[in-house]
Structures are given as structure tokens and as C-alpha cells.
Amino acid sequence: MKVKPAAEIVAFLAPIAEEVGVEIVDAEWDMRRRALTVFIDKEGGVDLVTCEVFHRAIDGPLDELDPTFGAAYTLNCSSPGLDRPFKTEQDFLRHIGEKIEVHLYAPFDGAKYFEGELLSFSDGVIKLNAAQGEKEIPFGKCSKVCLLIEV
């Protein structure tokens, strides 16, 4: 199935998301299931009602955009989940002051995993107050960065 790129769809839907009061944090195609999932977030989190309101708001405009060039597909709207990996600068900026976990491809300063308070993100560098002290970790060395979920 031929589809339009997720980035094009996100750009197209961004004004609608703003009207609804949400932010699109990601969109992805599942080609096996012929499904488009749009992940949204907002201050205080996303609930089922928010997903439904957004889904109804984008359903018609997406039909006009025709992201599958006439082929049938399923549209899903979802919250990003607590453990969603940070992908954009905005993901980092939204969580300044919160505890995060950083997984690395290879050891950096003797470790492949750090957790601590996110102090800043600038020019692709994560500044983290970890148990080992303050760390500046290039995002390109990270396999996954997400919120630290403490139980």
C-alpha cells in the first residue's frame, strides 16, 4: 500500500490539533495492519474522551488529504504512553526538571545507562543530574531516552 509520509500528515493535522488543544507528538504507519496511529499529548495527559474528540476532528480532513491514495486504512488516536521514547527537542523541553532514563548504544563515561533529573537539552546534548554527577550526553549516542517510571 502506498502512503504519504507521517511527517506530511503531522504537518497537515497540526492546525487541527492546536484547535482541539492537543499536540501531535508522533504518527506512524503499521503497514501490516494498514493502520495510521496519531499520538497526541496535552498538559495533564490524554484520556479516552480527548482521543475521541481529536479522532472526530481529523477524520474528515484526512479523507480530503487521502494519505493512502484511495486505499482503505484504519485511523487510531492514542496517548504516547508514559514510556514513549523522546524523539524531538520539544519532548525534552516538555520534561525539564523531571527524572528520565537514558539508554546508550555503547558505554559513555563507563556506563550504558543513566537516570536522573533532566536539566536541559540544547544543540543535541542532554544535560542530566545523575547519581554519578552532572552528565552531558550527546543524543546521537542514545538508543532510548524516556521518563523514569518509579514504582
Image: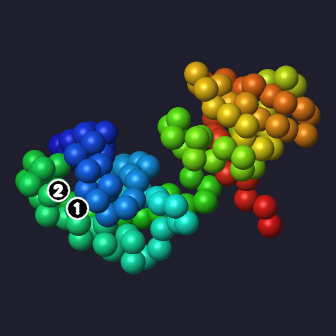
**Rendered view: 49 above or below 115:** below
Whether residue 128 can be seen here: yes
**Residue furthest bottom as drawn:** 49
Residue 78: image quadrant is bottom left
Task: Give residue 129's position: percent from left, percent from top.
Answer: 82, 37
Task: Give residue 88's position: percent from left, percent from top.
Answer: 50, 37
Callout count:
2
**Residue furthest right as drawn:** 132
Residue under the point 72% across and 41% down: 118
Residue 132: image quadrant is top right
Task: Give residue 38's position: percent from left, percent from top.
Answer: 36, 56
Whether residue 105 can be seen here: no
The amino acid pointed to by label 1 is: Ile
SS for dot 1: helix
Lateral position of residue 76 relative to residue 137, left or right: left
Kindly check if marks 1 and 2 are in contact, taking CB atoms under 8 A apart as contact: yes
Lateral position of residue 77 relative to residue 106, left or right: left
Residue ID for mark 2: 62
Quarter of the image with the C terminus is bottom right
Residue 107: image quadrant is top right
The amino acid pointed to by label 2 is: Leu
Residue under the point 19% across and 64% down: 59
The coloring applied to the image is rainbow
Residue ID for mark 1: 58
Lateral position of residue 120 relative to residue 57, left or right: right
